[in-house]
Image (spheres, rainbow, N blue to C red):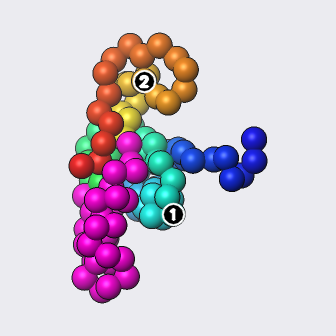
């Protein structure tokens, strides 16, 4: 596998640093799997990323349409969920979008 073949990244931890890393990768065109120990941390991270994208739109750094494109690249998975993009058998259904 080459670096150019990587299209999905996983970020463990949705705190300040984790949601920032997820934001940058999603803006760069990567699909993102964001994980944390509790769903509320994932919800907070998604809210923070959305607010940061709003700020970027307001400042003219990105077009309005890019916000939904970036948010569409993110996937959150609570720790009790075993479903992933890997070829394993899921035991529970999982939420799969930031929006």
Q: Main secondary structure of the magenta part?
A: helix
Location of residue 88 with respect to 60 vertically, above or below: above
Is any atom of residue 9 visible in this view?
A: yes
Task: Tell me if 33 is positioned left or right of 4 in this view.
Answer: left
- Residue in front for this viewpoint, 43 or 9: 9
Residue 58 % position (x, y): 25, 82
* Residue 33 sits in quarter: top left
- Please tell me which residue is depicted at 34% across the width and 67% down the height of the picture: 66
Mark 1 Cα-neighbour bin, 10 Å: few <14, some 14–19, many ≥20: few
Location of residue 36 with respect to 94 vertically, above or below: below
- Residue in front for this viewpoint, 72 or 44: 72
State yes or no: residue 97 in magenta: no
Looking at this view, name the residue that lies furthest to the bottom.
59
Residue range highlighted in magenta: 47-75
Instruction: Residue 92: give its label.
Output: none
- Residue in front for this viewpoint, 82 or 70: 70
How far apart are the alpha carbons under marks 2 and 1? 25 Å
Q: Secondary structure at mark 2?
A: loop
Instruction: Residue 83: give its label.
Output: 2
Residue 43 % position (x, y): 26, 48
Residue 53 % position (x, y): 31, 69
Count numbered badges in the picture: 2
Residue 95 % position (x, y): 29, 33
């Amino acid at each position: 596998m080459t670096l150019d073949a990587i299209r999905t990244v996983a970020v463990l931890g949705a705190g300040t640093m984790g949601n920032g890393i997820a934001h940058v990768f999603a803006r760069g065109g990567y699909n993102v799997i964001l994980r944390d120990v509790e769903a509320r941390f994932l919800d907070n991270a998604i809210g923070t990323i959305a607010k940061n994208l709003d700020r970027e739109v307001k400042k003219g750094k990105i077009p309005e349409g890019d916000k939904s494109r970036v948010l569409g690249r993110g996937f959150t998975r609570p720790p009790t969920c075993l479903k992933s993009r890997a070829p394993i058998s899921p035991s529970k259904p999982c939420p799969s979008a930031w929006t």
